[in-house]
Image (cartoon, rainbow, N blue to C red):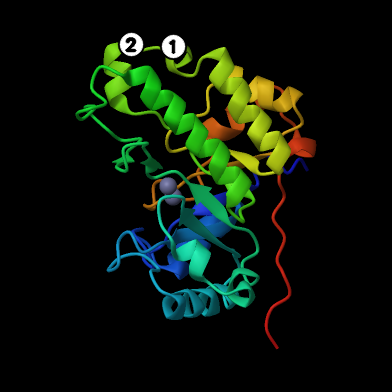
Amino acid sequence: MSRLGTQDLHCHTDMSDGDLTLAQVAARAAELGVEVGIADHVSSRNVERFVSSEARVRRYLDALEDAPVFRAGEFCWCDELWKELPAEVMDRFDYRVGSNHGFYLPDGTMGSPWWQKLPEPWNGRPHEVMDVMVANLCDMVAAMPIQIAAHSTLTPPALFDLENDVEAWWTAEREDRWVEALAASGVALEISNRYRLPHDRLLGKALQAGVRFSLGSDGHTRAQVAQLGWAEATARRVGITEREMFVAERRRRRG
Ligand SMILES: [Zn+2]
Ligand SMILES: [Zn+2]
């Protein structure tokens, strides 16, 4: 059987901002015949809801070790927690996911891939915002100890209001920069079932460059977890096969 579509490597539980318990996610995945990796938010950006301290990371990993899931975490590029965790804790993850939930702007502020409007002074400078965002992504895969870059081409809706064409923002040159950084780092490119990205042209270039891929539902609800229909169809449409997939494996458990 082809492995394509059999691993959802990006699921959330109520250990961060998902609706379902770990047991409910595992049960839903089993029902759908999909292996799942739990990649809850490991970040201090939301101290209450996220796995936001070393002690909480340890408890989170303990819980995952007792479940039939891959042990993962979604780390924020825009947060420091991933730099502060000891190696012995980082090593307990089967794999780690990195996300640009915010990107560093040269004026010291933080940009958002969910911006509905570009704030001053970036208003009217959308292509500069894009360049900075792409540069942040390239820095992210070079610097972070991750195996997967999640929903990486998420682009502020404010830009699509100006021009509703993904290739107007993800120009050939920006695509090339991102693909080169992925290839150089060995980090896999997630195809996000939730956000329906990346777009085909970028995926085709990544395939040509030898980049590896993963599928992620980014599921937070029962309707979303372990659902990979769009992501799997997209992978097949652009010619990705199981050979190009990042395949998760369980590390040895304690004791
Ligand atoms: Zn995310
Ligand atoms: Zn996520």
Q: Could you tell me which quadrant the C terminus lies in?
A: bottom right
Q: CA distance from mark 1 to mark 2?
A: 7 Å
Element type where label 1 sits in the image: helix
Please state the horizontal and vertical placement of residue 53, each as a whole percent of the image: 40, 74
Q: Is residue 66 positioned above or below 47 on the image? A: below
Left or right: 157, with 170 as reference point: left
Q: Which mark is residue 163?
A: 2
Element type where label 2 sits in the image: loop
- Say whether marks 1 and 2 touch (CB < 8 Å): yes
Q: Which residue sits at x=66%, y=44%? A: 187
Residue 55 image-quadrant placement: bottom left
Q: Which residue sits at x=60%, y=69%? A: 90
Q: Which residue sits at x=65%, y=46%? A: 6
Q: Is residue 175 positioned above or below 190 on the image? A: above
Residue nearest the viewer, comparing 82 with 27: 82
Residue 253 in view (yes/no): yes
Q: Is residue 242 positioned above or below 129 on the image? A: below
Q: Amino acid at mark 1?
A: Ala
Please state the horizontal and vertical placement of residue 97, each as a whole percent of the image: 55, 52
Badge 1: residue crowd in 10 Å (few <14, some 14–19, many ≥20)? few
- For ligand 1, tell me if the residue under mark 1 lies within 8 Å: no
Q: Earlier in the sequence, mark 1 or mark 2?
A: 2
Badge 2: residue crowd in 10 Å (few <14, some 14–19, many ≥20)? few
Residue 8 in view (yes/no): no
Q: Which residue is mark 1?
A: 168
Residue nearest the viewer, comparing 191 with 46: 46
Q: Amino acid at mark 2?
A: Glu
